[in-house]
Image (tube, coloured by chain):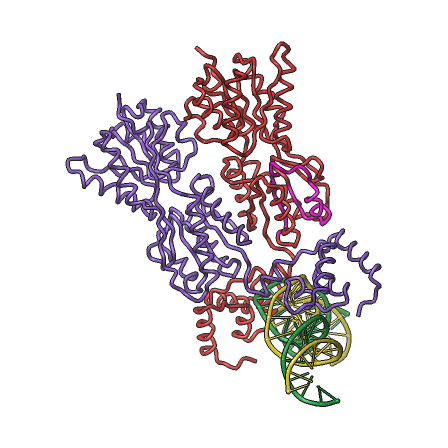
Chain colours: A red, B purple, C green, D yellow
DNA sequence: GCATTTTATGCAAACGTTTCCGTAGAATTT
DNA sequence: AAATTCTACGGAAACGTTTGCATAAAATGC
């Protein structure tokens, strides 16, 4: 039973909104002399509310700029309309494009995106996972950290049945959907290209042996070498996330081993290689040819332009998100053990040009 | 009064956790024969709980892998430990570095980050803002969309007192803290440099006249021209977010107006300019010199290497987040009308080299 | 040895929704 | 005209926490 006439209490409500306090369903209900449940139903356009009531409710809601409390709603519904994206880092063209794809789908579905960086650190990865176990998100999209050697910390997610999709850097031991590129095949193809343009001693720059992508690319690389007998044995150069250290390492290799080709497993290593070549005084592509997995937009503007294997990052993000939403929508069928593979695309540029 | 002996009900709880249901404070309480409030206090290490009880509670919580429900907690505390970052897009080196900085601080403070892209669209911006009004986040970090002409949609945020900090693309009309670079001064300085290396007809590529950064840079550009009499009048080339359209526009300008210098207000326009020069058959820096505000990591590897005004993106992100957390921590003092300015840094490279 | 404080805990009310269930009155059926 | 089904709404319980208040028992003060 409301005490105030409409004018008075409307004014009061307005004042509240103008100060700190935010307007709730309860206020709308009191204002309109309706039950809370009725207002709630009216706002969600329930069929059991008369058109007139709906009209009154929505009008007042609009007037007072009512905004539903997401936390109350999530708590009650046990669904947050939020997903988490867990990636190693953002200053990497690949991941920023993936996020773009993810967001495109999330926005379409009216979902919200929480973002977490592991900084290639397994410990941090475990902490994030641990927190998400509390029902914070409805699902997870994730690419593993470079230092992640065991997937023990992901086990609770599987047990709890929290939907998760891995992309790019996946885990073989976990039974979850994945979205990847044809790393093995494209690496093999790219290596063949290097040999075709005359390379006989190719160094493979590895980013982390823990990573699925690195393993598969390395495998494709080795396969290509085996396929063509008479090639020099493969050179595996272990690199890390420390750019300075990588630089020193690559310079040393260039000087001591004198490879005539470099296969960079990730973009960052290609860039470091460019700097290393400049430092050592080697000319690309004359002395050494370089190619890399990369999503660098300026690849064609580099000096020399860089031959790249471009991963369909944006589409991978969209695809991973789409799979996740399938899981969210049809909770019944648990047969989501699909592994989506999207082909990468090699673009040959001057860094692997046959010397003239 | 619990019905089960410890062993039995422990087993039961374990089973729950293994299936869907997640373990709550209530279960811990029943299990340990304690009140809910006691468990809650024990978990938050309240001084009024005995060490033995705390020990028992934390032990069981750990054993059952208890994780607090963030939504319940946020609802009750009216604080979400979450901030929102609203940016135009992510496929832009500047913004990805800013996010990195923001995340660094957020992680330190144990806050969570929701990310939203406006895609340079004011409408989308308004929708995001509208949603955040519902108490979803404790604070907002934001950079305005290129099409945002009015800031009406931000008014409710100010009225509600929701802490917000603008960075880079700020609003003058709103009374909120900002973090920017010295756009005017660095643009003026860069323009002087262009004139120093011989440019007499410089085209300024504008990204959007709605944007504070664009205005200030343009202003600095014009000021430099005025400071040095005898220069050709300034050429303002309005560009947009449509890369193809920009490309056509720049090609046309290069052909018809034949400028000998280009000042790109943002990175994207510099890259398009490189392509345009190649298309028109002009040589950089011989025919036309180019410089740009840019955070491109590969600027030094371009052909020719690009003279850039580097914004301290990472530090800007950290700084903006730091200011926001100040606001969050000391809700009383409302004197946060500070405007932080961090200096940009110009690195001269070959794209503005004096022709030989 | 009684009065008072302290210590450690329990009870219950919030936080803002959603939803199950119940029910007047109107509309419909028989 | 009585019995049934709708229609439109209200009451209240839940979601999982946190927190103000109350209170037994223990410790302290005189």
Q: Which segment is the magenta one?
A: A137-165
Vertical position of residue B269 compared to residue B153: above or below: above
Residue B277: x and y in percent read 33, 26
Name the foreground residue: A64 vs A235.
A235
The answer to whether A222 appears left or right of A5 in the picture is right
Based on the picture, tell me whether residue B257 belongs to the magenta stretch.
Answer: no
Name the foreground residue: B72 vs A327.
B72
Q: In the rendered image, which quarter contains the N terminus of chain A?
A: bottom right
Residue A76: x and y in percent read 64, 62
Residue B8: x and y in percent read 84, 59
Based on the picture, tell me whether residue A160 belongs to the magenta stretch.
Answer: yes
Residue under the image location 45 percent in, 14 percent down: A286
The answer to whether B10 appears left or right of D5 in the picture is right
Name the foreground residue: B107 vs A285.
B107
Vertical position of residue B4 compared to residue A244: above or below: below
The answer to whether B262 appears left or right of B27 in the picture is left
Residue A71: x and y in percent read 58, 60
Quadrant of res A237: top right
């Amino acid at each position: 039973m409301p005490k105030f006439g409409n004018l008075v209490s409307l004014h009061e409500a307005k004042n509240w909104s103008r100060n700190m306090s935010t307007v709730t369903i309860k206020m709308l209900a009191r204002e309109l002399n309706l039950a809370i449940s009725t207002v709630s139903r009216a706002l969600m356009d329930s069929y059991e509310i008369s058109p007139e009531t709906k009209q009154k409710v929505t009008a007042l809601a609009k007037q007072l700029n009512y905004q539903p409390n997401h936390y109350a709603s999530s708590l009650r519904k046990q669904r947050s309309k939020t997903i988490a994206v867990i990636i190693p880092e953002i200053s990497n063209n690949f991941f920023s494009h993936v996020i773009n794809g993810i967001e495109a789908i999330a926005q379409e579905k009216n979902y919200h995106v929480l973002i977490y960086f592991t900084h290639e650190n397994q410990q941090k990865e475990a902490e994030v996972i641990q927190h998400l176990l509390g029902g914070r998100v409805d699902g997870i999209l994730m690419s593993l950290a470079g230092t992640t050697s065991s997937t023990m910390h992901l086990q609770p997610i599987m047990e709890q049945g929290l939907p998760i999709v891995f992309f790019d850097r996946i885990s073989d031991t976990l039974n979850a959907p994945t979205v990847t590129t044809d790393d093995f095949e494209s690496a093999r193809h790219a290596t063949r290209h290097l040999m075709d343009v005359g390379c006989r001693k190719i160094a493979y720059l590895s980013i982390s042996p823990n990573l699925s992508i690195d393993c598969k690319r390395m495998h494709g690389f080795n396969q290509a070498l085996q396929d063509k007998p008479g090639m020099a044995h493969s050179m595996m150069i272990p690199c890390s996330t420390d750019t300075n250290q990588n630089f020193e390492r690559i310079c040393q290799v260039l000087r001591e081993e004198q490879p005539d080709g470099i296969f960079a497993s990730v973009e960052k290593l290609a860039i470091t290689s460019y700097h290393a070549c400049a430092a050592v005084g080697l000319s690309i592509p004359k002395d050494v040819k370089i190619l890399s997995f990369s999503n660098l937009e300026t690849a064609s503007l580099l000096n020399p332009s860089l031959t790249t294997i471009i991963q369909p990052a944006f589409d991978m993000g969209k695809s991973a998100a789409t799979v996740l939403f399938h899981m969210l929508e049809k909770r019944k069928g648990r047969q989501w053990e699909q592994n989506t593979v999207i082909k990468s695309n090699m673009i040959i540029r001057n860094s692997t040009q046959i010397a003239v």
